[in-house]
Image: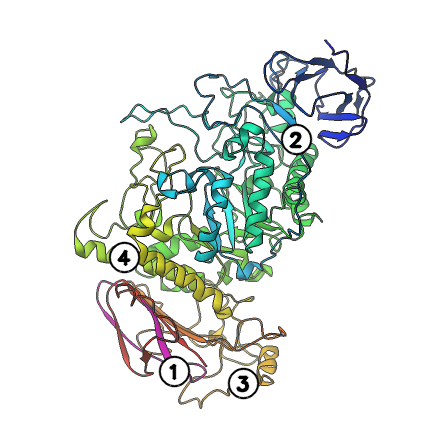
Amino acid sequence: MSHPTFAISRGRPMPLGVTYHPEGHNFVLMCRHGTKVVLVILPEEGNEPLAEIELDPRRHRTGDMWHVRVSGLPSTFRYGWRVDGPRTPRTRFDPSRLLLDPAATMLSDGAIWAGTCEVDPQRTSRRSMVHYSRRYHWDDDAPPLTPLEDTIIYELHVRGFTCHPSSGVHHPGTFRGLIEKIDYLKWLGITAVELMPIFEFDECNCPFVNPETGERLVDYWGYNPIAFAAPKAAYAASARQHGQNREFRDLVKALHAVGIEVILDVVFNHTGEGDDRGRTYSFRGLDNELYYLLDEEGNYLNYSGCGNTVNCNHPVVRDLIMTCLRYWVGEMHVDGFRFDLASILGRDRQGRLMVEPPVIESIAEDAILADTKLIAEPWDAAGVYQLGTFPYGRRWSEWNGRYRDEVRRFWRGEAGLAGQLASRICGSADLYQNSGRLPRHSINFITCHDGFTLYDLVSYNQKHNWANGENNRDGTDLNYSWNCGVEGETEDPAVLALRRRQVRNLIATLLISQGVPMLLAGDEFLRTQKGNNNAWCQDNDISWVNWEFAERNKDFLRFVREMIWLRKRHPALRRRRFFVGPLHGADPRLSSVGPFPPTGPVRPDEAGLSGLRAHPGYLPPPPPDVYPGLADIHWHGVEPYQPDFSPTSRSLAFSLDGRFTGREHDPDYRIDADFYVAMNAWEQPLHFRIPPSPTRRPWHRVVDTALPSPDDFIPEEQGPVIEPGSRYTLIPFSMIILVSRM
């Protein structure tokens, strides 16, 4: 079938997808094993094809690339591919199915969230789409290029962030709705938003029903992509006018205008086609044995836990991944990527881990991606755990799962965690330093989308996932949480007070730790999921950010914001390098390298000392009998310089010298404040003797998590003076932060 007004010519074999030229639209599809390829052109509305163009393999094929140029097409149209090929256990060709283009940058028929769940139960309506409107004007948009060590990440779900009626936006659940919240994000102080998956996915592809309500559940999180380069149409208020690409660009430009970067949570390790029982959207029908890892019988190797595993290191698949990443950076101005289950990107065709995975190297070395932030989730669902050892690590930061677990365990009162906690606070040198990496390679987090919210972490000992329809079997049982004495909601004032201390402790620890902090949206005002730690299928109040909590818990929101801005004001909390080892000939116990922290001061290197001595604000160290030497960091216990890293310890204290921030050679270098932090995760009060400030400046109390708002955080210039040598009592499960300013 053809259309009389369409002119067909050979076309060119690159680039992938559809490109427009004055002489027509050029279509390119990679299909190695297909023997018959048909391009189907459809109108913007309706399913009667405008043309079905069978490609001649002699005329329209170059190598494995099928291509054709079509002239005379309308400015908006839909299209798909029909492919036939040999029938083997490893192939799944079906010429009756109209397939999506893997390189499509827009899909049709997805404007309404879950709109096709009932009317199109087989999900056969989604089509690749071309829609040309006026050219997008980026104006003077440029990436903020915030240094990683200065970055504060805020993870959010585009739909869930504004879908709740309390959000007060005009376009809830959309990119435009998120734009309406930018003033709030700027006020809060974060520097980057990490958007949970916005690749097109099929939210209807969820088999479960809420047993309590009978409600059909959906794939709310979206970690099952069907098109790697197409923004989710249902996340755009203008999707009915095919405006999702423009609206996403508007979001990026608006965030950049206030200095906030955009990081995408990307899923290249598997697709939404699932296993043998899953639906075919594109990859399986185009070239099943090329795009997926298969065994000899053609069964899918499942390292993702989602039914299939993408054959990421095949050169063709690698090229597709790179094409999509370059599109998001070059055309959409995205600033970085967090790679879901990134260890899968290191597997070969048999599923074995590679020493130098080509796709990970390609991403790390690509010129277009050179300024982007690359964040790996350094594990997969099949037991691989590469924290601290992710390939090409100097280019990659990592989600630090040990940070999450050890901070949680310390603050719930486990004994013997003081040493591990100290290593996490110092940027996890034991994980990163020996490979030449820096604190910025550690993405520190206590909560994320996967697991308990911050409030639930201190309110539930057990998961409560009954609403997910899997008989509470889903989700992890290893939460390292503590309900503070009562499971779930309570009116007990003692329990509520302890929970408030605990959430302050956790947030304060996160924001004074070296590395890159990441917060979960809504945690800053104690959003709850009622104990659900795997809310992937909950498109309702369980997952949506309820903005009423921002007013209800405004005291805690204030605390979080003040902690964020404290971090932003002080480079001592955002060091560019690790606390360095001892000077030549010094006591080796002073080294900070290793799984446990030192028992004495960690000394700056000689280059840092030379630069410091030349600084007009240099203060020589006090006599040894007053203070035990010049150092980056000093460890303490309840007595100064006597830390307790024993198996029974439940406390930690340290002081930072504000003269050493890793920025001593910057032209605008200035001496920062000193910090003293003491933590008590024991069930009894502890009385800490306060050491002198490293620079002999007076201490001012800024934070005491045991005090009610607003005394839990007092501005630095207003905080009460705390005298060196005095005793400060920390009640059970509390911490203090003192600051010593010029």
Q: Are marks 2 and 1 in contact (CB under 8 Å)?
A: no
Which comes before the other along the chain, label 4 or label 2?
2
Percent across and percent down for residue 706 are 26, 65
Distance of label 1 from label 3 (alpha carbons): 16 Å
Residue placed under numbered mark 1 in the picture: 698
Task: Point out which mark residue 103 bears.
Answer: 2
Which comes before the other along the chain, label 4 or label 3?
4
Residue shown at 82%/17% (left/top)?
58
Residue 118 image-quadrant placement? top left
| Helix, strand or loop under label 1 | loop
| Helix, strand or loop under label 3 | loop
| Helix, strand or loop under label 2 | loop
Which comes before the other along the chain, label 1 or label 4?
4
Q: Are marks 1 and 3 in contact (CB under 8 Å)?
A: no
Q: Give the magenta part as a residue range.
A: 682-704
Q: Mark 4 Cα within 10 Å, few/some/many (few <14, many 20+)? A: many
Percent across and percent down for residue 38 are 70, 15
Task: Point out which mark residue 618 bears.
Answer: 3
On screen, residue 19 above or below 394: above
